[in-house]
Amino acid sequence: MTTAEIFIIVLTAILAITGVLGVVIFNGQLSAMQRQNQDGRDAFIISNRAFVFLSRYELNPILREDGSVAKWEVNPIFENTGPTPTKNLVIKINSQLIPVAPPDNEFPVDQEGPLNHGSMIRPHATATIEGPVITVEQIDQIVAGRQRFYIWGWAEYRDVFANTKCHRIRFFNSMKVFGDYRRRPGPDGIPLRMPVIGVFNDPDDECSHQ
């Protein structure tokens, strides 16, 4: 084999190795750029996604003709603190008046009944959902310690961004009485409170409803 032939073989090998190294470096740079782009997109979505939670309850008295209170509406109010609206919002509300307390480490199952299919909650806005109605006679039972009132459920929604997962929040509250619930609220405010039960009022990203 001549010197020229050896030189050509060596040069060919060097060029092949250089080409392979170039491909490896290019793929590495491409992967890094893709990861950087994905990380940037994820950070953008996290900071701009809708974020819904149960803000509070709207407790409205229903009056008799004589002005006394006959019933109370218990309406959950959901708030979206995110800068974008929700999409495909679904809410389930359950309530029950029972003589014993449920376990505080188990989330109750859904009762039969319709789901609330809301269109959306606007950015930095709230949505009031029609909830159960409880009579003053039923509240009498709560005050006497013979019954307990609970309301629970969940909300599921998606972001406006494509290819993002469904978000789910749960809530579980009881009713406590702190005043005269037979009269319309006065200077002391609403005589009813809705404290949290258990650890079920945090966001949960695993959606179960289809």
Image (spheres, rainbow, N blue to C red):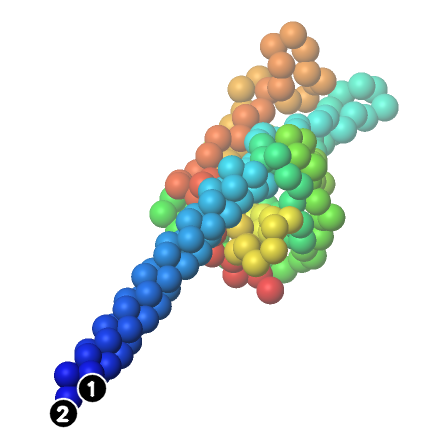
Tell me, yes or no, whether the two marked residues, 2 and 1, touch with CB atoms within 8 Å.
yes
In the image, is residue 93 above or below residue 182? below
Q: Secondary structure at mark 1?
A: helix
Residue pointed to by mark 2 = 1
Q: Is residue 55 left or right of residue 43?
A: right
The answer to which of 38 and 131 lies nearer the viewer is 38
**Which quadrant, please, contains the N terminus?**
bottom left
The answer to which of 140 and 15 lies nearer the viewer is 15
Badge 1: residue crowd in 10 Å (few <14, some 14–19, many ≥20): few
Q: Position of residue 104 (x, y in %)?
A: 38, 44
Name the residue type under label 2: Met
Residue pointed to by mark 1 = 5
Q: Position of residue 142 (x, y in %)?
A: 53, 33
Badge 2: residue crowd in 10 Å (few <14, some 14–19, many ≥20): few
In the image, is residue 166 above or below residue 182? below
Q: Secondary structure at mark 2?
A: loop
Name the residue type under label 1: Glu
User: Residue at the location (51% across, 37% down)?
Assistant: 47
Q: Position of residue 7 (x, y in %)?
A: 19, 79
Q: Can residue 38 be seen at all in this image of the molecule?
A: yes
Number of marks drawn: 2
User: Residue at the location (56% across, 42% down)?
Assistant: 49
The answer to which of 59 and 12 lies nearer the viewer is 12
Q: Position of residue 46 (x, y in %)?
A: 50, 42
